[in-house]
Amino acid sequence: MKEYSINVTTDTLVITFNPFDNSVAFVNAIEVVSMPDDLIVDDASSLNPASTYSGLGYQALETVWRVNMGGPVVNSGQDPLHRTWISDQKFLLQSSLANDVSNIAAVEYVPGGATQNTAPSSVYGTAAEMNTSGDPNVNFNVTWAFDMEAGFQYLVRAHFCDIVSKVLNELYFNVYIDSLAAAKDLDLSSQSNNVLAVPYYKDLVIPLADSNKLRVSIGPSTLNKDNPNAILNGLEIMKMNNSIGSLSADAASGAGGISSGSSSSKVGVIAGVSVGVVSVLVLAGVCCVLCRKKKRLARQRQSKTWIPLS
């Protein structure tokens, strides 16, 4: 399945399939879902170089990974936006360094913070934490590694919820992306108005110029030497469109089924999905498009209608 999030500014969404030469293109089904405007905010912290990235809400995004740390798979029926969150176990570089914790009942959403649409309580209520029992010096990080496509910027949304602390202000830790400091001495208590188990997320933008791996790590802070720990509850990694408005490396290089003479439109007005199939090798699946409408209320629909592709 391919999932895209785009900013739609008109009442018309056009999806076009362009096959590669000597190939065919098809899709089994397309689902278009309206999503809350505030699910993708405009600003994020940019790494390498460190700065603020603005205009994120107008980017086209392709979901690459959506992971539930320290818990089982969260299927679409458990998520208000019908997303699936897979387990983090296959991404851990050294699983013995992490403990799984769960306390879903403790999760407390508060006004102005993350909501169930951001991530459900089944994600915020589970976490991976440091396994400090096997290391008396507690001098290690817990690291997850993900396969990626080089040549794009990525939005990394890290989800946190302090379900491990007994009192406020006892959990301080660091977050790294590819050895770059993404959050230093992160104190979840200060991010949640001094209330435990309040969901919080942090958006980070990082370029992958020539690497096909992305590593996310959590580790202890020097501010908490008596009870060192670090947690991560969930992670979403989304590819951002490149300078020509494409999420395809083939389009950027001039390959694929998009002809050089075809006209292009701004991302978010017209969404194009290209699927190339060579010979008898077919790519079957579902294309899901999540639409964001800026400065307009999304119209709620009580039923879904599937329209055959002509």
Image (cartoon, rainbow, N blue to C red):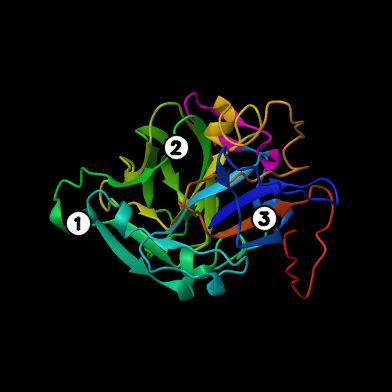
Find the residue positioned furthest to the top. 49
Residue at image location 55% in from the left, 40% down from the top: 22
Q: Is residue 187 visible?
A: yes
Q: Secondary structure at mark 1?
A: helix
- What's the residue type where badge 1 is placed? Ser
- 86 in magenta: no
Q: Nearer the viewer, residue 258 or 278?
A: 278
* Crowd rating for badge 1 (residues with CA inside 10 Å; few <14, some 14–19, many 20+): few
Q: Nearer the viewer, residue 70 or 65?
A: 65
Which one is in front in this view, the residue at disc 3 or the one at disc 1?
3
Relative to 216, is 191 on the left or the right? right
- What's the residue type where badge 3 is placed? Leu
Q: Which residues are magenta?
A: 44-58
What mark, if any, has residue 149 been given in the picture? 2
Give whichever of discs 3 and 1 has the lower sequence position. 1
- What's the residue type where badge 2 is placed? Glu
How far apart, in angstroms, are the residues tagged by discs 2 and 3? 21 Å
* Crowd rating for badge 3 (residues with CA inside 10 Å; few <14, some 14–19, many 20+): many
What mark, if any, has residue 96 been given in the picture? 1
Where on the picture, by quarter, is residue 44?
top right
How far apart, in angstroms, are the residues tagged by discs 3 and 1? 37 Å
What mark, if any, has residue 290 been given in the picture? 3
Q: Measuring from the top left, give residue 49's x and y in whole percent.
A: 49, 23
Residue at image location 48% in from the left, 47% down from the top: 279
Relative to 221, is 157 on the left or the right? right
